[in-house]
Amino acid sequence: MITAITQERAQYSLQSALQRELKNKTAKVGVIGLGYVGLPTACHYASKGYKVTGFDVSVTKVESLKCGINYINDVDNDELTELINKKRFTATTDMKQLGNMHVLLICVPTPVNKLKEPDISYVRDVGKIVAEHVNEGTMVILESTTYPGTTEEYICTPLTEMGYVIGENLFVAYSPERIDPGNKKFNLSNTPKIVGGMTETCTDLACMFIGPTAHRVNGIRVAELSKIFENTFRWINMALVNEFTVLCNELEIDIWETINAASSKPYGFMKFTPGIGVGGHCIPVDPYYLLYKAKEHGHRTKMIELAGDINDGMVHYSYTRILELLAINDKLMKHSHIVVLGATYKSDIGDLRESPVIRLLERLQNKVQNLTVIEPYAKEIQINEQIIPVEKYDADILQKADLVVIGTPHNCFDWKSVHDNASLIFDSKNVMEENGLLSDKVAKL
Ligand SMILES: NC(=O)c1ccc[n+]([C@@H]2O[C@H](COP(=O)([O-])OP(=O)(O)OC[C@H]3O[C@@H](n4cnc5c(N)ncnc54)[C@H](O)[C@@H]3O)[C@@H](O)[C@H]2O)c1
């Protein structure tokens, strides 16, 4: 009995100590993984008044940050410099310092391998490192996107093996990051953030830390699944519009006009646009985390598989359209010079991960006489395991091309100049029409 009361008092004092640190913003916050999610997250909490330490295994990233060099577009250079100068944000590779933190946010990658199976190794490794170094009274929040059950298996298990009792002397929650790189309207300050803890106390503490944007859910698995649900929703709707695109080509109906017509309905329809495929670290990856978990339970997620087939098939469809377009214009692919404008997975950012334009370039390489990539947001790109340089926009390059493919329509491109200097254009994003530049030399996706 005495032991139980003593334990309850100990728990209460650890909990109230953390609450005090959070209320006074004196809690030391550690962010593990300083990539597209981790660095903006670290800056967000540092600018809210917390003292933040960023942890990363990449010496290059940590050294850059120590010199005040920013490598993420969404992070403001001046803000980062100020946070570093005021010592509100520091970066390190020294994981022993994890033990000095009151709150730990885990933002490491959750990719898939070539077989589209989850690679959970980053979360697993961090779970072990955290368990080795963490101290009583700390709150650990996993932010990486993953399948239900991950937080329990890879974060809680190593901690309980070290003797911690979750919800009593250590607090664990899951809160998926919804960052949308390049989005100027929605950011960490105005986007609701789902929060689910291992216990009620864990949820309370995590909500308190996250603040007014916290959207509380009952249970950590709901929080884990909700993020995958959001991205699977996009994945499946993108597949639907891509399937309509292929069909519209057969039926000789304009898909873009069809989408705009359907979008005139003020309720019950959400606009998605087609493309060469679906890219990035999230949408083409996250549904496969759920597919894997479902398979473990003997269940097939048929819509995810089908959407994958359709979305992945868009590269082949685009390749075939390019082949046809050249043929109609009396050109042979093997004698052609093709220029591709934009190769990142979405406009106005430098992230090349899972970009369908790269997959299209892989199909085109070695089949054309000359392939040029114009990509203002990258220095080089990797095609078929070969690093190739990219060019800056130059009207002369377009003039010499047999075909210009609009891959990723960055806003910095001058579409009038593209139109006037190219002899033939394959427009995967309908930017020519949207800019009033539709003509005989433009073919839409
Ligand atoms: N990129 C996005 O737009 C986005 C949006 C929402 C959610 N997410 C999710 O957030 C998570 C992180 O994605 P990201 O795009 O920031 O990845 P990223 O690759 O840009 O960054 C991850 C960072 O983690 C570091 N890292 C790897 N192992 C580590 C370890 N053991 N210890 C410390 N650091 C380590 C890497 O060096 C890298 O800097 C993923 O689960 C992703 O699905 C990403």
Image (cartoon, rainbow, N blue to C red):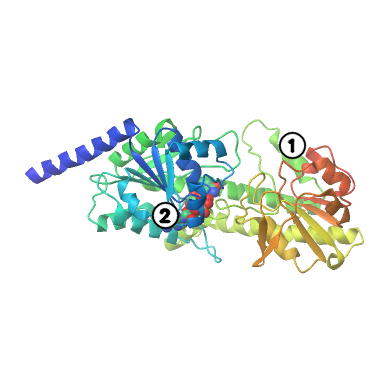
Q: Position of residue 358 (x, y in %)?
A: 68, 59
From the viewer's perspective, is residue 288 above or below residue 273?
below
Label 2: element kind: loop
| In front of the other: 376 or 168 | 376
Mark 1 crowd level (few <14, some 14–19, many ≥20, 10 Å Cα): few
Q: Residue at x 12, y 42 (%)?
A: 6
As drawn, the label of residue 188 is none
Q: Could you say which quadrant of the image residue 435 lies in?
A: top right
Q: How many marks?
A: 2
Give the residue at mark 1. Answer: 261
User: At label 2, which amino acid type do we have?
Assistant: Thr
**Location of residue 90 in the rendering, given as x and y in whole percent from the top left corner:** 43, 44
Question: As displayed, is residue 35 above or below residue 206?
Answer: below
The residue shown at (79%, 68%) is 367
Q: Residue 126 versus residue 266: which sits nearer the camera? A: 126
Q: Earlier in the sequence, mark 1 or mark 2?
A: 2
**Residue visible at 84% across and 65% down?**
333
Question: Can the viewer see residue 109 in this picture?
Answer: no
Q: Which numbered disc, 1 or 2, marks the residue closer to the eye?
A: 2
Q: In the rendered view, does 322 fall on the left or right side of 175?
A: right
Residue 112 in the image: x percent, y percent? 52, 60
Write down the quadrant of residue 309 in the picture.
Answer: bottom right
- The crowding category of the residue bearing disc 2, from other C-alpha atoms within 10 Å (few below 14, some 14 to 19, many at least 20), is some
Gap in Å between the C-alphas at discs 1 and 2?
A: 53 Å
> From the viewer's perspective, is 73 left or right of 329?
left
Q: What element does badge 1 sit on?
A: helix
Residue 96 place in picture, x, y as percent:
33, 54
* Tag 1 near tag 2, CB within 8 Å: no
| Residue highlighted by disc 2 | 93
| Circle 1: residue type | Ala
Residue 24 appears anywhere in the view: yes
